[in-house]
Structure formats: structure tokens, C-alpha cells
Amino acid sequence: MKAHSLPPELPLDQVLVGDCVDAINRLPAASVDLVFADPPYNLQLGGDLRRPDDSLVDAVDDDWDKFSSFADYDAFTRDWLSACRRVLKPDGALWVIGSYHNIFRVGSILQDLGFWMLNDIVWRKANPMPNFRGRRFTNAHETLIWAARGESSKYTFHYEALKGGNDDLQMRSDWYLPLCTGEERLKDGKGAKIHPTQKPEALLARVMLSASNPGDVILDPFFGTGTTGAVAKALGRRFIGVERETVYAEAARKRIAAIEPLPPEAFAIAPSKRSEPRVPFLSLVEAGLVKAGETVTDEKRRHSAIIRADGTLVLGPAVGSIHKIGALAQGLPACNGWTFWHVEREGGLLLLDALRGRIRAELAAA
């Protein structure tokens, strides 16, 4: 876990009630690691929405989602995005979620302000609301935009951790997650939803685990009932929430107070292979872990090559790196020689990458 030097004036782990732009403008510049924003979608609902049995759908018709025009919405979007960009650290990033009503306008303004697009993520809902009138496709997804503060930002991305949790497959940009239901859904004393668009904790957890570190400060300018704060507390992150509606802010505070943080080992960041020291194959020869003249082979012993004293391999007339000769042996354009070649040791074949790991462990202990 990296050490964090936090400005003493930051209102950490607090819910600020008021206008988001005013609240963010009071924060120090370059003080936030990550922004997660779930702004008004500007749904433009033109009346009641009813099911085929004429029952009323609990849709979003609150005043905070109503704007007089697209120009009004664009000005609002530009204001809060500009405020967020000011408080983001140089290597910070922003996530914003929306629907077809607003996400394209938000994306355009993001680019105009200098944010650098990294991905758009499709949240595929496991249990979407149907299109009751049967005149359009079921709206079964929402879109998240992940953007770095700028083109040169060294943003956080835990590629290997995500891959490990996804059965060693790259995490894709379509996430299949259910809506917020059951005990997680906040309701009032009459059983009514406190907030109409409460996001599932699983969605926020994936965002934070992929793009932040323990101890990072996460700003949510549209805090709602506090999903960002609840997940941040559980995962060892700090949060700053801004919410203009008092009823939502109070519900968020109560919700977050009941959250028990996970033990640090449950969310500690595993070392990235990219951050590990580079160890050339010659170092294994020099350390005596492999010997010149020794044979390397693939796991099924179909291909073999000879180690040379200079750290290259020889295969017939060809001489080259462990990667080049591995690719040549298989007739492929590329190969990771560390995970292809093995040496014979007591008990069977040993991967070259395992021997490299020994040197890396020694370097880490030095």
C-alpha cells in the first residue's frame, strides 16, 4: 500500500450537503485520486409511465433530473466536470455513468475539457425493466466512461488482479451485474425506495478495485444514498461525498456508519508483474540457476534448444533470445520464453519463470 500525504483541510469520509460545484470548488486543487460520478441523466420523461395493467411505474421524475434544454444540461455538465478536473491529481481518473439520454453529451464535453478516454464500459443489467409499450428495445444497459485527467496521466489500473479474478481471462468492457435489489436497496418506513437510481455495490466495487488503491481519496459529486462511500469504507479507501438533497445525505450517513471495513488482506494490492524488476535470461546463467550447454524444452517436450554462455538459445542454425527461439520453434510471430521454456530438475520440468522469480525475490530482500 502506498503512503498517502493528505491535505489536512480535506473533508474525508464526510457527506457534504449542497451544490456539487460549490462544494468541489472549496476543495484543494490536485487533492483527489478518483472521481465516480452518477449525474442526472436528463431523462426527459413526458408524463406518467404505466405497465400494461395500467399500474404506475416508479420512474425517475424528480426535479433534480429536469433541465430546460440540452444547452442548460450541457452547461451544468461542463461546470461540474471542470470542477472535478481541477481537484483531480495529475495521474487521477474519472468514471461517469449514464444512459443514451446523456452519455454522448457527457463524453463530448469530457474530451473538450482535456480528459483522455480510456474505455467505455457497458453495464449489462441482469434484471432490466422491460419496455412496457413495446415500441423500443428493452433498455438493458447503462454506459460508464473511464477517462484519465489528461493524455499523459499515469492512471491506476490493476490489470492482473482483475484477470486473476476472472479465471485468468482479460476483464472485458461488458460487465454483467444485477440491479440493486433486496436488502441492499434502501427503503423508507413505508417500504418505498429512498432513491430511484441507487447503484449496486458490486458495480462500485469493480470500479474501485480496478482503478484505485487502498487509501486513495474518491470523490462522488452526486452521492445519493452513499453507495460510493459504503464501498470505499469496506475496501479501505477514503471518500468525499456531495449531495444536495438532505434526505439522501442522511440516509447515506446512516448506511455508511453501519459498514464494517474488510480486513486489509482482503483488498491489498498484489504486486504487478510490470512493476517487478527486469531480470534478463543472462542473469540466470550468471547466477548458476541454468548452465551453458543445458537443454531447455517445452512442457510436452516437443521442442528443445541449447543454452549459450551469453544468455541466448541455439536451435539448429538459429541463435536468439528465449522469446525469439520459442516463437521460431512453434512457427509463431511471438512467444513469451519465460512461460514456454522449461529445464529438467529433480522431480520433473521447471519453468524458467520460476527461476526468474528466485532472483526477483533476492532483489526484493536486498
Image (spheres, rainbow, N blue to C red):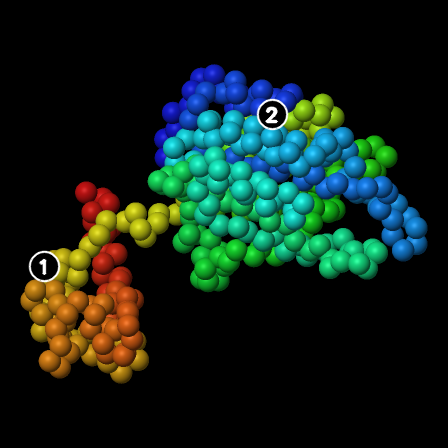
- Image quarter of residue 366: top left
Closer to the camera: disc 1 or disc 2?
Answer: 2
Q: Which mark is residue 286?
A: 1
Q: Secondary structure at mark 2?
A: helix
Q: Position of residue 331 (x, y in %)?
A: 27, 79
Viewer-closest of 222 and 300: 222
Q: Residue at x 65, y 26 (%)?
A: 243
- Image quarter of residue 105: top right
Q: Residue at x 92, y 54 (%)?
A: 53
Q: Secondary structure at mark 1?
A: helix
| Residue to which mark 2 is pinned | 20
- Position of 246 with respect to 31 (left or right) is right
Q: Residue at x 35, y 40 (%)?
A: 152
Viewer-closest of 361 and 176: 176
Q: Residue at x 24, y 45 (%)?
A: 364
- What's the distance in space between the residues labelled 1 and 2, CA to CA? 60 Å
Badge 1, how many Cα within 10 Å: few under 14, some, many 20+?
A: some
Q: Amino acid at mark 2?
A: Cys
- Position of 308 with respect to 304 (left or right) is left
